[in-house]
Image: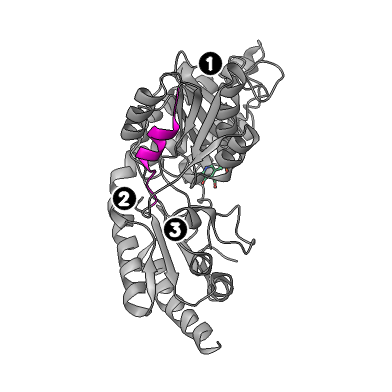
Amino acid sequence: VSPGSFSYLDNAATTPLHPEALAAMLPFLGDRFGNPSGVHAMARDARTALEEARDIVAACLGARPGEVVFTGGGTEADNLAITGVHARHGGSVMCVATEHHAVLHTCATLDGRVMPVRADGIVDLDALAAALDETATVVSVMLANNEVGTIQPLADVAEVVRRAAPNAVLHTDAVQAFPWLDVAQLAAPAHLVAVSAHKFGGPKGVGALVVREGVDVAPVIHGGGQERDRRSGTHNLAGIAGMAAAMQVTVARRDATVARVGALRDRLADGLMAAVPGTRETGDRNAKVAGNCHVRFEGVESEALLILLDEAGVCASAGSACTSGAIEPSHVLTAMGIDGADALTSVRLSLGPTTTDDDVDLALKVVPEAVARLRESD
Ligand SMILES: Cc1ncc(COP(=O)(O)O)c(C=O)c1O
């Protein structure tokens, strides 16, 4: 494949590296190769770069530098948040049915409870309040969903947790939120906040967990005691520097990106509904991130549709990247009350900062043709 010859509409799976992120990484893949844990000049240079990156990441997340723990991505950050608090305090853990598997499966290993959502994908606050008690130690509620883009009302969630489970900490998976939302502000009520660089123009395999002062997490990865003993392992300095640069770019341009890409998303979603009979949009467009277009084409199996789209140069997804390939209804759609057959007709077209008018034009040409072809062949 050559870039530019296709329409990449899978930004919720991963995003292209920002040029600024690549430029920030290169020195640490070259001459500045020191290990920040050492004492000599090369090590001190690396330590300085690490702490500069930490300052940037902290500022972009509304945290203090000492509250930032660098991890090997979003999955690890979610694991550290939930397992780390549970290992220290025991008790019961709870998450929402539409969480990413990084949270759902971690909760499952701790016999956690799973809270229902309403038909629009928003967590049922009454059910949450009723289920919580003083035994709860971790409650995990994502800020934005990876499949349908639903934004959770985190301030309301935090209020319920404070009242009903005073001993619990609130963890939020902000992995999909960061490209679109002011995480520093919206995640302020959470004690723990997970992000992943590759969702906002940074490199893969690096992320961060904000652990607010006073919150105690046991390490999940044991070793040399890096990250104030919260996450051992030699720092991925190139990755961390790339993440910090990508964060700066994302935050600086976020308002403009949301306005521009939100308009593209609206044109795409409205265009598909106008051009393809029997198209339904999933979730409430007013309560989802600007890059998410999630639609269901009645009677059209999404796996077959994705193959035709791929052949015609449109990269899309049938659900979260981690589950595409598995022909099972998405747990997110099932939790929203969408039945299995309907859920299997769903396609996620996720836009990003590099999405252009041409990308949307190609999708608006290709998708209706592909749906029509599949319906004819039935
Ligand atoms: C909401 C959410 N949480 C966690 C993750 C995992 O992040 P990573 O790919 O960095 O492990 C993803 C990635 O798909 C995600 O969308």
Residue located beneath label 1 in the image: 216
Residue 157 falls inside the magenta stretch: no
Reply above or below: 36 against 376.
Answer: above
Q: Secondary structure at mark 1?
A: loop
Q: Where residue 42 sits: x, y (%)?
A: 64, 18
Numbered mark located on residue 256 in the image: none
Q: Residue at x 33, y 56 (%)?
A: 261
The answer to which of 160 and 17 lies nearer the viewer is: 160
The amino acid marked with disc number 3 is Gly
Residue located beneath label 2 in the image: 287
Q: Secondary structure at mark 3?
A: loop
* Upstream in sequence: badge 3 or badge 1: 1
Tell me if 354 is positioned left or right of 321 in this view.
Answer: left
Tell me if 88 is positioned left or right of 299 in this view.
Answer: right
Q: Where residue 35 sits: x, y (%)?
A: 66, 21
Q: Quadrant of the N terminus?
A: bottom right
Numbered mark located on residue 337 in the image: 3
The amino acid marked with disc number 1 is Asp
Query: Which segment is the magenta one?
Result: 121-133
* Upstream in sequence: badge 1 or badge 2: 1
